[in-house]
Amino acid sequence: MHFDFELILTLATAFTGLVWLVDALYFAPRRGKAALPAAPEAENVKGVHREPMLVDYSKSFFPVILLVLVLRSFLAEPFHIPSSSMVPTLLVGDFILVNKYDYGIRLPVLHTKLVNVGEPKRGDVAVFRYPGDPSVDYIKRIVALPGDHIVYRDKTLYINDVVMPRDDLGAYTGLDAEDAELGREHFGGMEHEVLTMPGRYSNEGEWTVPEGEYFAMGDNRDNSNDSRYWGFVPEGNLVGKAFFIWMNKDVYKDSSLWRRVGTVIH
């Protein structure tokens, strides 16, 4: 069962705000008028003026829920990494923050863009709603932009007929991957680490990215369900840019994971 926290948060904000507004405009004035004849008796006045429990809770929780909704919808949202498709950049169990502002301000739930602040860049680690099932969030690296021609062959990436060079860093000795080779791939002015597995098949081919869509791949190249298999990411499916690791769920099992806390994602 899919738990849509964004929808629940939006409904809770609307409900508590509506209860507060209706009470302030209609019921609170009536309670005030009803209390006037009882003015000489302070105890009765207090009883008449007492707010219903629903109103009291709504007034208390509405500002808090609204603040969480605004922060989560427009600034930053936490996510949990459930798979190894982005190893070595992200490990299973990482908790990350995603910048919701960089790719435009969108309405919660409807995801309609209100303000076009910016667009993804090649090399961004992005969270998006999986085109095959928008209720599922995926995280991959944006490797090609609208209009780009991309080729993936012999575990090598070409963008617009230019090879993305990869330095061989030897056998990978980290977590969440076995029998993998570590490499450093160069994307123009930036670089990031990737994994490949000698002898393991991964989908090869060439694609031209349509307007308004993006091509995404996992850094664990031979163990990633990405655009090579299911196609492009529509601009409307973008959620935000991953930028920070704030926790890993296994830090108490493996103390070495503490060093990941506070890591900036590249």
Image (tube, rainbow, N blue to C red):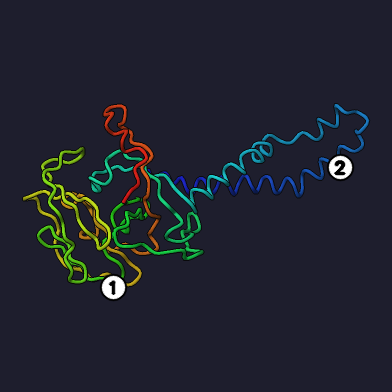
Residue plotted at (28% across, 73% down):
147
Residue plotted at (33% across, 62% down):
121
Q: Where is residue 104 in the image (x, y as percent from the top left)?
A: 45, 61
Residue plotted at (53% across, 48% down):
69
Residue plotted at (65% across, 49% down):
18
Q: Which mark is residue 33?
A: 2
> Hey, which residue is sitting farthest left in the picture?
199
Residues packed near mark 1 inside 10 Å, few (<14), some (14 to 19) or many (20 plus): some
Q: Position of residue 29 (x, y in %)?
A: 81, 45
Vertical comparison of 155 with 177: above or below: below
Q: Where is residue 92 in the image (x, y as percent from the top left)?
A: 27, 40
Could you tell me how far apart the alpha carbons at marks 1 and 2 are, in whole angstroms? 67 Å
Q: Which mark is residue 147?
A: 1
Q: Where is residue 19 in the image (x, y as percent from the top left)?
A: 66, 45
Name the side, left or right, on which 233 lies relative to 154.
Answer: right
Comes first in the chain, label 1 or label 2:
2
Amino acid type of the residue tagged 1 in the rendering: Gly
